[in-house]
Amino acid sequence: MIAKERLRAVDELFQTSVPNSGNELQGRVRIAAPVGFGHKCLMPALLELSTIHPQLDIDLTLSDERVDVVDEKIDIGIRIGFMRDSRFIARQLTKINMYVVASPDLINRVGRPASIEDLNHLPVTGLVDRNTGKLWPWVFSMDRQWTPSITRFRSADAEAELMGVQNGLGFAQIPDFSAQDLLRQEKLVRVLKEVEPVPWDLYIYRPQRGPVPQRIRLVFDHLVSRLSVR
């Protein structure tokens, strides 16, 4: 009951804007999202919406750095992970799984890991946290983490890392939205399935700024509809 009441309260807050008019569905909507998710999942949804409502002006910021949406005056944000900030109204969309993968050629050459510890003796890649300059740790079941000490390739760009993995540079841990098509095409192989972490929550959110313009409500509802059924 508490969850349903909270969702109803979110809807009521969105409905505090004035009745719909043609002008209300025009103008800029600023959106912030992680880079990989923005490319793979968000852009198709936004392109569809822009075709239906060409009067909208979508201003999209893609960054894996933590964006202060309040200071940057972002209207809608997408975040993977925890949402415990009282400044935002948030709605959970779906779950994101994290997979350890490698190319078939690399596995044929070096074998596949049977445990997390085996990764210490295999070529791996690393994704750099732009905020700290350090590698993001890999996460596993039972709250275990592992951070590569030696990498064959590292980058702050997730797409560059993915390209390296496809070309056999090393094993990597990547989110399911980046891996699914490549796994289906057998260009990547999933390993260490038995120690995969609990899926992460994907949220859409907006700052609490009083009445919500209809154009923001329109974009928010469209993204909820499309991203909840990836």
Image (cartoon, grey):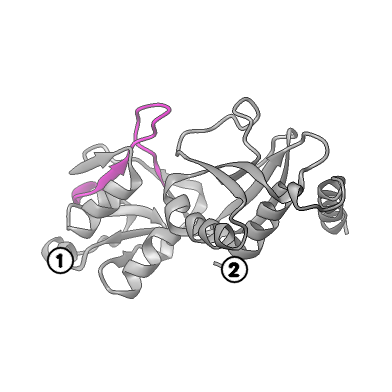
Residue at image mark 1: 105
Q: Amino acid at mark 2?
A: Val
> Residue 61 placed where, x, y %?
50, 39
> Could you tell me which residue is drawn at 54 percent across and 56 percent down?
46
> Could you tell me which residue is drawn at 51 percent across and 55 percent down?
42
Mark 1 Cα shell of 10 Å, populated few (<14), some (14-19), many (≥20): some
Q: Secondary structure at mark 2?
A: loop
> Could you tell me which residue is drawn at 65 percent across and 64 percent down?
225
Q: Secondary structure at mark 1?
A: helix
Judged left or right of residue 84, residue 171 is: left
Judged left or right of residue 24, residue 159 is: left
The quarter of the displayed image where residue 98 is located: bottom left
> Residue 156 placed where, x, y %?
33, 37
The kind of secondary structure the magenta stretch mainly shows is: loop
The quarter of the displayed image where residue 133 is located: top left
The quarter of the displayed image where residue 222 is located: bottom right
Q: State how far apart marks 2 and 1 are (Cα).
A: 33 Å
Front residue of 155 and 114: 155
Tell whether label 1 touches label 2 (CB within 8 Å). Answer: no
> Residue 65 placed where, x, y %?
46, 34
Quarter of the picture containing the C terminus is bottom right
Residue sitting farthest toward the left: 109
Front residue of 61 and 175: 61
Judged left or right of residue 138, residue 107 is: left
Mark 2 Cα shell of 10 Å, populated few (<14), some (14-19), many (≥20): few
Q: Is residue 82 visible?
A: no
Q: Is residue 162 magenta?
A: no
Q: Is residue 85 visible?
A: yes
Residue at image mark 2: 229
Instruction: Read off the magenta span.
Output: 120-138
